[in-house]
Image (tube, rainbow, N blue to C red):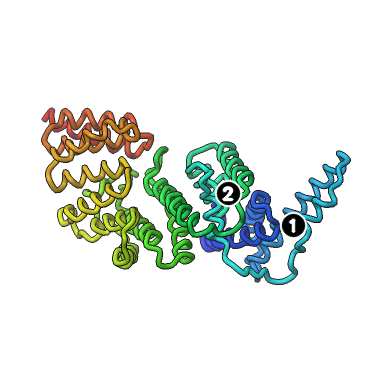
Amino acid sequence: MTSEVPANLEHLLREMAPQVLGVVARRHRDFDAAEDAVQEALMSAAKQWPIEGVPRNPRGWLYHVAVRRLVDRVRSEVARERREGAAAAELWAEWAFVPPPTGDVEVDQDDTLVLLFMCCHPALSASSAIALTLRAVGGLTTAEIAAAYLAPEATMAQRISRAKASIRSSNVPFAVPDDAERAERLQLVLHVLYLVFNEGYASSGGPSLQRVDLSNEAIRLTRVLRGLLPGDGEVEGLLALMLLTDARRAARINAAGELIPLDEQDRSLWDRSLIAEGLTLVSTTLARGPLGTYQLQAAIAAAHDRAPRTEDTDWAAILGFYGQLRDLSDNPMVALNHAIASAMVHGPAAGLELLDALDADRRIAGHYRLDAVRGHLHERLGDPERAIAHYRAASERTASIPERNYLISRALRLAGRKTT
């Protein structure tokens, strides 16, 4: 949508996007063309509804407009085929077999879950799945997705186009996968939503630390997923993790846009309503078991959010949760955070010893966070020279300007102490 669209209208359009797309794709049997047509309908609504008002049946309005776009496109194709001497009667019949309804559009099923599984098909890369999910299920335009990920619009359009071509060539049916595929694909869906949230909460590059539109969209889509799969522990765990993390957003930056680390944040700025909702979800999902990775991460976020002061944080519990996480997943970032928690419980030397093992892991070796954590632990050990060296090395490797500025300021502050 555009920035001129009122927030409540934008929310309505994004909520209806997968519902309308599901009907169009099911009835006209072409996900690629249906997705393009629904996007055009959403853009028309974003322009017209603020002026003319929301129609009595907004979903039906979007469906009618999308179908007209399909018909116009087919007519154009038919005309081109005829000019080239091809027989196009069958093509027209295939697209016109379901006439546009005259009344309300009856949706006999909610296709949002189907769309999520389709957009997160194993044939797609993570970046392609993210882009397609935000466009098809989230209702974001290509321009909005490109702006959020600091990529040229043409590049993002090609990525989405390739993703849809991959789905088309793989002959993925428009249906919920069977039980085995569903279990496998659900992990991909959760991972895509997790990546979208992380990029919104802690942007990997550019001048802004946060992109609130992305983190909000990830939370919205995860709420939708929870409604479609009630009682799923990992879905609840992911939603709780997002809420408990997003609750700290207002305290993460100061008036100048500078990063404030967790241990220095003003906790009175944390969103207590999000924390309450997240803690309730954590209590519910931890009681179910067995625990998955998102449930454990939510438990860690809950331990941080429960502490009224930094010094009240239950680091022993956090270390235990990271130990369980490390047993469940071979993830170097989990090992890094486990080392941080170990340093908080057993001292910075213990954390530094655990970090040494990560230097041999090609997935994280050379990552700026390794140097940033080493800088922090050497600072706690009272070794400013090593801390400064690691902070500077980390600042040279991160693509995030706010994080770079924060790391440089830590180094300068220590250097200033050395000279006084």
SS for dot 2:
loop
Q: Seen in the image, is 27 located left or right of residue 352? A: right
Q: Distance from label 2 to label 1 (Cα)? A: 19 Å
The residue that mark 2 highlights is 141
Q: Residues within 10 Å of mark 1 (few under 14, many from 20)?
A: some
Q: Seen in the image, is 32 located left or right of residue 413? A: right
Q: Seen in the image, is 332 located left or right of residue 380? A: right
SS for dot 1:
helix
In the rendered structure, which amino acid carries the disc numbered 1? Arg
Quarter of the image where the C terminus is located = top left
Q: Is residue 39 visible?
A: yes
Quarter of the figure with residue 58: bottom right
Q: Nearer the viewer, residue 306 or 133?
A: 133
In the rendered structure, which amino acid carries the disc numbered 2? Thr
Q: Which mark is residue 197?
A: none
Q: Residues within 10 Å of mark 2 (few under 14, many from 20)?
A: many
